[in-house]
């Protein structure tokens, strides 16, 4: 079941979740096991995240959210 456009817009962006967790792009990158540039690219919509299950768990734990609470699109373009 896919989310409607209005449901997707109700999810905070990755940038918002990261800032709410008090993490810099570099800090989140270290936790997840990617580069700061990678996190920047996700937030700018320049690349799509391709993470392993352990990386997804680390991302959710670092942000204090469940997998369902992560935005489908990590880009901040809709802010």
Image (cartoon, rainbow, N blue to C red):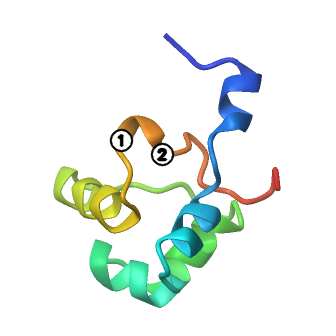
Q: Which mark is residue 77?
A: none
Single out the residue that lies furthest toward the left: 54
Measure the alpha-carbon separation of dots 2 and 1.
Answer: 5 Å
In x, y percent, where is residue 11?
Answer: 62, 41
Residue at 55% in and 44% down: 71
Residue at 81 percent across and 50 percent down: it is 78
Question: Which residue does the image show at 29% across and 78% down from the upper left?
Answer: 31
On the image, the x and y values in percent for residue 27 come to 41, 87
Query: Where is residue 17 shown, x and y percent of the image?
Result: 55, 62
Residue pictured at 69% horizontal, 60% vertical: 45
Please give left or right for residue 24 compared with residue 28 in the image: right
State if disc 1 and disc 2 touch (CB < 8 Å).
yes
SS for dot 1: helix
Q: Which residue is mark 2?
A: 70
Q: Quadrant of the C terminus?
A: bottom right
On residue 67, the disc is 1
In which quadrant of the rendered view does residue 75 lie?
bottom right
């Amino acid at each position: 079941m896919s989310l409607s456009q209005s449901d997707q817009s109700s999810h905070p962006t990755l940038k918002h979740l990261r800032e709410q967790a008090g993490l810099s792009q570099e800090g989140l990158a270290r936790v997840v096991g990617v580069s700061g540039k990678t996190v920047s690219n996700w937030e700018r919509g320049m690349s799509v995240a391709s993470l392993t299950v352990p990386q997804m768990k680390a991302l959710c734990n670092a942000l204090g959210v469940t997998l369902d609470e992560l935005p489908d699109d990590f880009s901040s373009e809709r802010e």
